[in-house]
Image: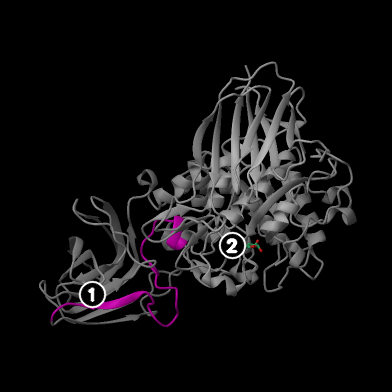
């Protein structure tokens, strides 16, 4: 994976942070005249199915392999459940498919079973089934019974060893044809939270039944159907993101053309979604499909940045530009129509059928992902074909290129925005925080669509980092903050940026570091999460020039012109505290107390499931503020000072 220095060479000097030889370390802020406008979409999120981000993550489904499609031979994650003298045999049964899309089912044959000694099948979830007190779970499944079976089905959540029943309910009898069933499971108020539990479907009589799409949703965000895990979604909302780049990443491209994110197969009722293999080594249910991505944006009050499949897949397959590519271009047009079209349009009507008549806002469309990997050299022409067709129908959309192609193809191929990606060490981010200081202001804008500092010497995809925690430590957060300060200083050209990857289920990672970690029960933000939150929730709308002299503190200064607040971000990646003379030129007076939010910790400190808030911002008041004042920046710290203009 390339995660390079931006290939676009700096041409014109922009906002410079110049070191001047002065006696005392200082930061001089020019508040008389803004140096530019902060992009209103500067901070957002990037997402894809990696590290069990959706299945086993944000998507609330607790059952793993609910459609029995994860493995062609075995009902993985399902085991026989039998109590006392009960006996049961389970197997995949492709001869009893649910439909043309879900072409198998699970056959459960109870040879001996009774109400006191039930027989059935148990699911182990995504590293456990989450159990919390006083909770309601939505259960649903498709089922049918063989002739002669007149028993009833019971669903329950029980401890791993089967001895404790956390919730249980008896369902109806079954019929001979596929039918959908739903029930509610409720836990008692005295239950202790645990994920050492499994979900059981059992029968109380001998006989054969078939199951498909067995689903268990613990409480979801605002109780939505097919919804999200509330603790994880809340962490995202707290970041105040302005956009969500979806659906990837590599996940968009797939290993092969056939296994790309084929959006039309991810919408509609879940029994019509076949799911697909993801490039990260496991199968995606597509329960979180295009409509859920859009709802997710809406829940965060953010806009989608829609990446469309552009004819290149990771293992090297590509589609030739020209007639071969046309169906994929049409797919992208259809997708844009699904997101934005009126209900009188074909795909707008489909969206309405899927429960959302109102069009979603959309301003940015990205053509592909990391197409510098395409060694066939076809991206230039693929980009031209996509962009000309999309622009003809949607002239207001801003198009993002994943590779610098326009120099060869002229103005028609000129993207509005380039997507640059950086996975680098902490030192590299600290050193390169001025990367865009000299970027040509007349060139296309920049979207830093993936970035993250790794504190170890192993790059994120290197398996040797397996022994390290899945989320970054404070040292990495310092690198990330230094980098963000540079992006923010240059947010007249850097219109959007997002950390990647966003999520990791701590039991199933393919990549580190990741911003937010979780298991079946709990979630936490890494120090980099809190660094991002400090930045993304204190932005302002104007960039103020800040000139640092004789200090290694890295800064960014912005102002909220309506509130009259100046945000001074100070990143000290060194082990020494640093005293800084801060002078604000162009204001007559400042309120004498400022607020500071500071993350300061040993570089090796980190957060985890067991210590989720070891490294978090701490609030304090800073007295004695004048247009010229002294501030001591703590070692290894990230600070936002809020100065109030009187
Ligand atoms: O963020 C992980 C991966 O890194 C993304 O899928 C891909 O775009 C990049 O190479």
Q: Nearer the viewer, residue 86 or 34?
A: 34
- Residue at figure coordinates x 44%, y 78% from the top left: 71
In percent of width and height, residue 80 lies at: 27, 79
Q: In the visual, does 122 lie left or right of 551? A: left
Q: Earlier in the sequence, mark 1 or mark 2?
A: 1
Q: Is residue 124 magenta?
A: no
Secondary structure of the residue carrying tag 2 is loop
Query: What span is in magenta?
Result: 55-84
Residue 635 against residue 157 in the figure, above or below: above
In percent of width and height, residue 220 lies at: 37, 49
Estimate the spatial distance between the alpha carbons at disc 1 and disc 2, rounded to whole Å: 35 Å
Q: In the visual, does 103 lie left or right of 24? A: left
The residue beneath circle 2 is 261
Q: In the visual, does 398 lie left or right of 475? A: right
In percent of width and height, residue 97 lies at: 38, 74
| Quarter-of-image position of residue 494 | top right
Check disc 2: other Cα within 10 Å, few if <14, some if 14-19, many if 20+: many
Secondary structure of the residue carrying tag 1 is strand
Q: Nearer the viewer, residue 3 or 89?
A: 3
Residue 305 against residue 56 in the figure, above or below: above
Mark 1 vs ligand 1: CB below 8 Å: no
In percent of width and height, residue 65 lies at: 40, 70
Magenta segment's dominant SS is: loop
Quadrant of ligand 1: it is bottom right
Number of the label disc, if any, that sits on residue 120: 1
Check disc 1: other Cα within 10 Å, few if <14, some if 14-19, many if 20+: many
């Amino acid at each position: 994976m390339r995660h390079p220095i931006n290939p676009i060479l700096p041409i014109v000097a922009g906002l410079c942070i110049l070191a001047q030889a002065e006696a005392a370390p200082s930061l001089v802020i020019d508040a008389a005249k803004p140096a530019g406008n902060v992009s209103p979409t500067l901070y957002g999120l990037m997402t894809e199915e990696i590290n069990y981000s959706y299945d086993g993550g944000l998507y609330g489904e607790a059952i793993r392999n609910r459609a029995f499609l994860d493995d062609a031979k075995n009902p993985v994650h399902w085991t026989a459940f039998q109590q006392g003298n009960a006996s049961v045999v389970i197997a995949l049964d492709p001869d009893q498919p649910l439909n043309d899309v879900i072409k198998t089912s699970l056959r459960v044959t109870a040879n001996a079973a009774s109400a006191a000694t039930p027989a059935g099948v148990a699911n182990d979830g995504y590293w456990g089934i989450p159990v919390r007190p006083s909770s309601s779970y939505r259960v649903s499944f498709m089922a049918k019974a063989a002739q002669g079976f007149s028993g009833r089905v019971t669903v329950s959540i029980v401890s791993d060893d089967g001895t404790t029943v956390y919730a249980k309910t008896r369902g109806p009898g079954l019929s001979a044809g596929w039918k959908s069933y739903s029930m509610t499971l409720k836990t008692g108020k005295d239950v202790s939270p645990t994920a050492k539990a499994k979900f059981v479907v059992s029968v109380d009589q001998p006989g054969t039944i078939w199951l498909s799409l067995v689903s268990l949703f613990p409480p979801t965000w605002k109780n939505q159907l097919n919804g999200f895990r509330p603790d994880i979604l809340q962490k995202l909302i707290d970041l105040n993101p302005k956009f969500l780049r979806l659906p990837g990443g590599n996940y968009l491209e797939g290993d092969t053309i056939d296994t790309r994110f084929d959006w039309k197969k991810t919408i509609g009722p879940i029994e019509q979604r076949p799911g697909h293999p993801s490039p990260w080594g496991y199968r995606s249910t597509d329960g979180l499909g295009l409509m859920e991505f859009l709802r997710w944006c809406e829940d965060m009050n953010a806009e989608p940045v829609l990446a469309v499949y552009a004819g290149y897949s990771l293992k090297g397959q590509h589609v030739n530009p020209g007639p071969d590519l046309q169906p994929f271009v049409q797919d992208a047009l259809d997708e844009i129509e699904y997101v934005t079209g009126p209900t009188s349009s074909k795909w707008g009507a489909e969206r309405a059928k899927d429960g959302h008549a109102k069009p979603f806002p959309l301003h940015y469309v990205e053509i592909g992902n990391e197409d510098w990997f395409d060694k066939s050299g076809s991206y230039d022409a693929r980009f031209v074909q996509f962009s000309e067709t999309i622009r003809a129908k949607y002239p207001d959309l801003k198009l993002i290129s994943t590779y610098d192609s326009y120099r060869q193809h002229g103005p028609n191929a000129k993207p509005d925005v380039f997507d640059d990606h950086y996975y680098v060490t902490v030192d590299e981010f600290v050193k390169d925080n001025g990367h865009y200081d000299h970027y040509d202001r007349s060139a296309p804008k920049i979207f830093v669509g993936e970035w993250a500092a790794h504190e170890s010497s192993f790059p994120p995809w290197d398996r040797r980092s397996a022994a390290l925690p899945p989320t970054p430590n404070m040292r990495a957060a310092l690198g990330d903050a230094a980098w963000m300060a540079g992006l923010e200083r240059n947010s007249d050209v850097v219109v959007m940026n997002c950390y990647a990857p966003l999520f990791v289920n701590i039991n199933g990672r393919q990549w580190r570091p990741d911003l937010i970690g979780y298991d079946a029960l709990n979630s936490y933000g890494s120090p980099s999460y809190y660094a991002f939150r400090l930045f993304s929730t204190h932005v302002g709308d104007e960039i103020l020039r800040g000139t640092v002299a004789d200090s290694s503190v890295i800064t960014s200064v912005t102002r909220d012109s309506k509130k009259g607040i100046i945000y001074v971000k100070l990143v000290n990646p060194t082990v020494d505290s640093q005293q800084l003379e801060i002078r604000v030129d162009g204001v007559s007076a400042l309120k004498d107390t400022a607020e500071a939010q500071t993350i300061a910790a040993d570089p090796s400190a980190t957060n985890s499931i067991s210590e989720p808030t070891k490294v978090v911002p701490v609030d304090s008041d800073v007295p004695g503020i004048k247009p010229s004042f002294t501030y001591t920046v703590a070692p290894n710290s990230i600070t936002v000072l809020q100065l109030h203009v009187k």
